Amino acid sequence: MANIFEKKLNDFMAKVIAKNPSEIEFHQAVHEVVESLIPFIEEHPQYSEAKILERMVEPERVILFRVPWADDKGEVHINKGFRIEMNSAIGPYKGGLRFHPTVNLGILKFLAFEQVFKNSLTTLPMGGGKGGSDFDPKGKSDHEVMRFCQSFMTELSRHIGPNTDVPAGDIGVGGREIGFMFGQYKRLRNEFTGVLTGKGIEWGGSLIRPEATGYGATYFAEEMLKTRGDSLKGKIVAVSGSGNVAQYATEKVTQFGGKVVTLSDSNGYIYDPEGIGPDKLAWVMDLKNVRRGRISEYTEKFKGSSYVEGERPWGVKCDVAMPCATQNEVNEEEAKILVKNGCFVISEGANMPSTPEAVEVFLHNKILYGPGKAANAGGVATSGLEMSQNSLRLSWTREEVDARLHQIMINIHETARKYGTQKDGFINYVNGANIGGFVKVADAMLAQGLV
């Protein structure tokens, strides 16, 4: 039987690769999902007869456009703009915009495909999408970023709307960029509507949205630990990244009684054996969010900490690892080191941060491994809550939003546990999240006919 499944997987992937050449990250994301789903679909032939998987890997719409803008010296620049509208079976397309030089079609298709499953798991009515540009906001003035965002939104505004496609932020797109894009959309369409999430609290944003992904990944880690009668209290935690997700994961882990000892950026990582408590975290937030400095500056401020250049923090001894930076940041060798050093919980704050080989290491050693599409769904879940508040013209309190987020993460964990528990009692959260996310979308697609 295993050989039959493997042949079906290989045949399916051969077709995907032929149709989408050179899109390595997309191939990786599809392979990981389909590997989980083929045995499930064999038991439920209605999905294969309707070619649900074949339809799910094909975006409903791909939008490509040029983005011309002028810098402060008057020099003209041209960037690429993208929006992948992947699947709208259960709601409007929903997913972030990423501004980074590495952005290309393959990366955005991988992110949009993952988003379909992640959004389904939240139980909220949201389809999946993703977009962005190869524009790099680093080193640009506020005026340059504004001109780029206005040019980008001038084209994107034709394709989005509160009931069609509701983008959010992602890497390189924070409150500043969302503000500039929302202003341009409002100007062009002459309407004030919930077309973007991650907005400022004074003009339609939701409390807890900046914290949501990091908080959610921590709530998911806590739920996984509960299945073994354990908790985050007293645990040593290695966190990668130092942006939004890493910052708020650090905050919530500390509130749960854990001790975060690492943070990183693209140049290297810092290690603080005393832990990155509230005061130190406040300093990091100022460094990264206001001064936009490098994490290496931490060691100049806090004695007893050290900085390791050009490496990621996975060699540090820890109980829990939370990759919160970017895709493929934990490779097979690093995964083996983590397990050897006693790490037994992985909760992914980033999208697909572990390579397939690393995931195999985690599953083989039967540790608690929460894949991104489940563990980091808190961000898009709170974006969905922001959409709800915009539709109702209401603003919920911080406590209300946090309570809803916490319950959503508990529900996501329960869905992944339900579909992922094996005969030996081990919970394969990869299978659980993939199957749990698939069923809702697939049933909606069946009900809506061949569209």
Image: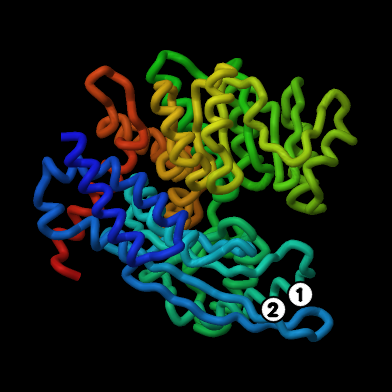
Q: Is residue 390 visible?
A: no
- The image quadrant of residue 282 is top right
Compared across the picture, whether 22 is left or right of 205 comes to left
Q: Are marks 2 and 1 in contact (CB under 8 Å)?
A: yes
Give the amino acid type for the residue marked by disc 1 in the picture.
His
> Camera-side residue: 261 or 383?
261
Q: Where is residue 169 drawn, in percent x and y?
A: 56, 59
What residue sits 15% from the left and 68% below the top? 450
Q: Secondary structure at mark 1?
A: helix
Compared across the picture, whether 418 is left or right of 190 comes to left
> Camera-side residue: 240 or 22?
22
Q: Where is residue 312 drawn, in percent x and y?
A: 67, 37
Mark identifier at residue 143 = 1
Q: Where is residue 265 drawn, in percent x and y?
A: 71, 45
Establish if 361 lies above or below 448.
above
Give the alpha-carbon distance from disc 2 to disc 1, as whole Å: 6 Å
What residue sits 38% from the left and 56% below the top? 113
Give the amino acid type for the residue marked by disc 2 in the picture.
Arg
Establish if 117 lies above or below 86.
above
What residue sits 49% from the left and 38% below the top? 216
Question: Quick one: label 2, few (<14), some, or many (20+) residues within 10 Å?
Answer: some
Image mark count: 2
- The image quadrant of residue 419 is top left
Quadrant location of the C terminus in the rendered image: bottom left
Colour pattern of the rendering: rainbow
Q: Is residue 368 visible?
A: yes
> Camera-side residue: 324 or 15?
15
Q: Which residue is mark 2?
A: 147
Quadrant location of the N terminus in the rendered image: top left
Question: Quick one: label 1, few (<14), some, or many (20+) residues within 10 Å?
Answer: few
Mark identifier at residue 103 = none
What residue sits 44% from the left and 40% below the top? 356
